[in-house]
Amino acid sequence: MIEKFEVLYHSAVRIAADNKVIYVDPYGISKKFNDADYICITHSHFDHFSPKDIEMVRRSDSIIIITEDLYADVLKIGFKENRIVIVEPNKKYNVEGLLIETVSAYNTDKAFHPKSNGWVGYVFNLECERIYVTGDTDITPEALSVKCDLIFVPVGGTYTMNYSQAAKLVNQIKPVIAVPTHYGSVVGTNTDALDFKRLLDPKIECKIMI
C-alpha cells in the first residue's frame, strides 16, 4: 500500500486510497493538484497551515479538517461552513465516509506546541490499514498508545522529536513501515532521515520519501 502515499515536502503528505485523495498539512506544493477530497491540518504553524498551498490542492467541494483555532482562518480563504470539520484531540470521526482518529500532538520538553492548544495528529483507516500521521509531537503517552501499520513521524528536531527520539517512539509502536518527515527544509537535514533509519528495529521497514 505504500505506493499510495507521498511526502511532497517537509510534512506534506498526500494519500490516494479507498477512492479518496487526502492531504495532510500541504506546504511547499510545487504544482497544482486541485484534487483533494479532504485536507487535514494538524495545527496553525506556517509550515502546516499554508493558505497558498491549500489553494494548490483544494477543489471547490473539498472538506477541510481542522482544530478549532483555525476556524476563522479557513472561512477567510473561502471554505463554506458545511465543508469545515472541527476536531478535538483523542476522538473518532466519520467524515462523509472517511474514518479518522485524532491523537493529541504536543511537546514535552519545549514550548513550541503546548498540549493546551489542542493540536493533533491523525490516524486514517484506509483499505484495512491504519495510517498515523503524527503532526508535530514529542514522545507522549497518546502517541505511544497508537496501533498502526504505517507511521509518518518528524525526525528533524528543534520543534519536534529528533531522529533518535523518533526511532524510540516508532520502535515501541512497532508499525510495519515508518516514513520520516519534517526535515530537509525548515529544520533538519537528510542525514537525520538516514540516522533515523539506522536506529529502527530491523523488523520495521523505513521508506525515505523526501
Image (cartoon, rainbow, N blue to C red):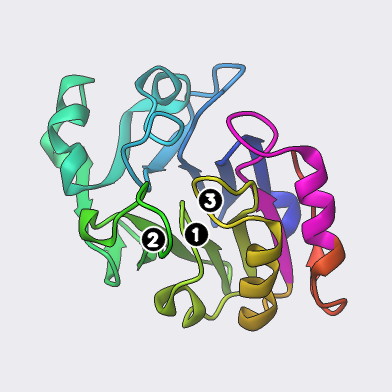
Give the image location of residue 39, x and y in percent. 39, 40
Check disc 2 and report the residue beneath it: 105
When asked about the image quadrant of residue 153, the answer is bottom right
Mark 3 element type: loop
Mark-to-mark CA distance, 1 and 3: 23 Å
Residue at x 70% of width, y 78% of height: 171
Image marks 1 and 2: residues in contact by CB distance under 8 Å = yes
Residue 134 is labelled as 1
Q: CA distance from mark 1 to mark 2?
A: 7 Å
**Vertical position of residue 8 compared to residue 76: above or below:** below
- Image coordinates for residue 181, horizontal then vertical, percent: 64, 47
Check residue 125 for magenta coloring.
no
How many marks on residues? 3
Residue that label 3 marks: 19
Q: Earlier in the sequence, mark 1 or mark 3?
A: 3
- Against 28, residue 209 (above or below) is below
Disc 1 element? loop
